[in-house]
Image: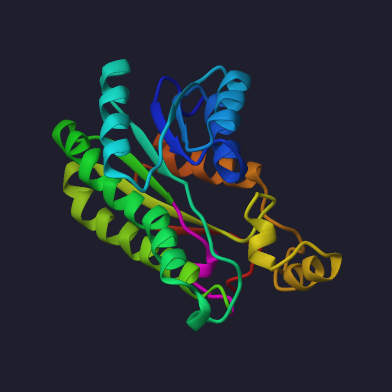
Amino acid sequence: MRLNNKIAIITGSASGFGKGIAKKFTEEGANLILVDVNYKLLKEVSKNLSQDYFVADVSKASNFNSLLKYAYKKYNSVDIFVNNAGITHKPKPMETVTEKEFDKVFSVNAKSVYYCGKYFVPRMKKIKRGVILNVASTAGLSPRPKLNWYNASKGWMITATKAMAVELAPFNVRVNAIAPVAGKTPLLKSFMGGNTQKKKQTFLSTIPLGRFSTPQDMGNAACFLCSDEASMITGTVLEVDGGRCI
């Protein structure tokens, strides 16, 4: 029960890594507000975990502001905020990615972290307590060809994590990131540019441990970094990647 009675918000928690993190946090005793734009899936996950939920588009300021009001009305505090929501564009040469695709990737992957800082950080600073976890990617550390602007968005998130950590340390607010390799999530097909056995084997050949990340892997790593066991860790990017970045 490493997160016993902690109040945590997890974005993008209706599926994939977010769902895995939510499951682990529930097992470790946290009270959650699960956030996603997909109402149907979110409601199902919420019911299965017996946790609260809030439908929101994390790329919109108005949605973030509403989430803030809801969270503090219900719990009066937020101990942990996990910025997990993320999207990608399909693999293609950088010059063929449309401006609309670019804007959408950065609105979800980067702007959501900005909104977390704008709306939730002031409350954490005031009580001098809190943990923020950003779900980045190995793509931000070792970019894959043709995932150009997705790579860049995750690199932005890694730098943002370090910038937030050093600025918020005096307020006892810790900020870390995890960098998963591609995993068994709805985004996997987009990362690979298809779902054939050949594409899977090509992708897996770049991962020394020979398997994709799982939602459980992410849940375990996230739980540690958000727990008091990691009280001396801030500004780090934990690679949960089967050795891909070696």
Q: Residue at (26%, 61%) from the top-left corner?
A: 163
List x then y, in percent, for residue 179.
Answer: 51, 59
In the depicted structure, whether residue 164 falls above or below residue 28: below
**Residue drawn where x is 36% and y is 48% of the image:** 59
Nearer-the-camera pick, 222 or 102: 102
Q: Is residue 16 visible?
A: yes
Question: Would residue 143 be found to the left or right of residue 62 on screen?
Answer: right
Magenta-drawn stretch, dominant element (helix, strand or loop): loop
Residue 81 is left or right of residue 243, and the answer is: left
Residue 230 in picture, x, y percent from top left: 41, 43
Instruction: Say if the magenta span includes residue 221.
Output: no
Give me the residue at 59% from left, 77% from top.
Answer: 92
Is 24 placed above or below 183 here? above
Q: Is residue 65 left or right of residue 19?
A: left
Residue range of the region highlighted in magenta in the rendering: 135-145
Can residue 23 be seen here?
Answer: no
Q: Quadrant of residue 100?
A: bottom left
Q: Quadrant of residue 14?
A: top right
Residue 154 placement: quadrant: bottom left
Residue 13 horizontal side relative to residue 232, left or right:
right
- Residue depicted at 41% across the width and 53% down the height: 108
**Is 140 included in the stretch rendered in magenta?**
yes
Residue 209 in the image: x percent, y percent? 74, 63
Q: How many numbered callouts?
A: 0
Location of residue 129 in the rendering, given as x and y in whole percent from the top left corner: 24, 35
Q: Nearer the viewer, residue 218 or 67?
A: 67
